[in-house]
Image (spheres, grey):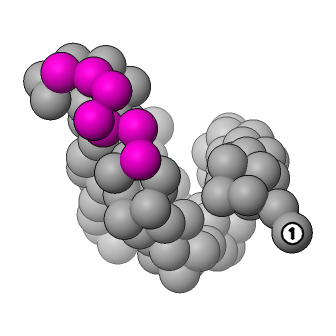
Amino acid sequence: MDGITSILSREHQVILKRLDRLEAALKPYNRQVVVDTLRFFDEGVSLHRRKEEEFLFPMIAPHFPPDMGPVACMLHEHKEEKELLDGLRESVERGEDGDAVD
C-alpha cells in the first residue's frame, strides 16, 4: 500500500498537467477548458489540499517552527492558490470572450 506522500505526489503530477492545460487554454482563450479546470480544482484539488492539511502537515509540523518551514510555506501556497482561482473564476464570469482574462 502506498504511503500518503506517494499518493500526494501522484496527485501533484495530475494537478501540474491540468495547470499546463489551463495555461494553453488562456491564449487563445478557451472558456470551456478554463471552466473544466476550475471544476477540477473545486472538486479534486480541494480534496487533495484537505489531505495535505489534515494528514501530512500535522506529521511534519512538529519538526519546524510554526511560522516558518515547509508547512507554513505550503499553507501560504494553498491560500494564494484559492485567491488566484477565485480571481480566475470572477474573470470567467465577467468576460464571455476572454477579455477579462488577459
- Crowd rating for badge 1 (residues with CA inside 10 Å; few <14, some 14–19, many 20+): few
In this rendering, the answer to whether 44 lies above or below 67 is below
Q: In this rendered view, identify the residue nearer to me: 85 or 12.
A: 12
Q: Which residues are magenta?
A: 59-65
Quadrant in which the N terminus appears: bottom right
Q: Is residue 10 left or right of residue 93?
A: right
Determine the residue located farthest toward the left in the rendered image: 67
Q: Is residue 62 magenta?
A: yes
Q: Residue at x 35, y 72 (%)?
A: 93
Q: Residue at x 15, y 29 (%)?
A: 66
Q: x, y (%) of residue 42?
A: 47, 75
Q: From the viewer's perspective, tell me whether residue 9 is left or right of residue 66.
A: right
Q: Quadrant of residue 70?
A: top left
Q: Is residue 96 visible?
A: no
In the rendered image of this protein, does residue 74 appear above or below residue 56? above
Residue 69 image-quadrant placement: top left
Q: Which residue is mark 1?
A: 1
Choose between 70 and 87: the one closer to the eye: 70
Q: Between 79 and 6, which is closer to the camera in this rendering?
A: 6
- Is the residue 71 above or below the residue 49 in the image? above
Looking at the rendered structure, the secondary structure element under dot 1 is loop
Residue positioned most to the front: 62
Q: Position of residue 86 (x, y in %)?
A: 29, 59
Q: Is residue 5 magenta?
A: no
Q: Position of residue 81 (x, y in %)?
A: 37, 46
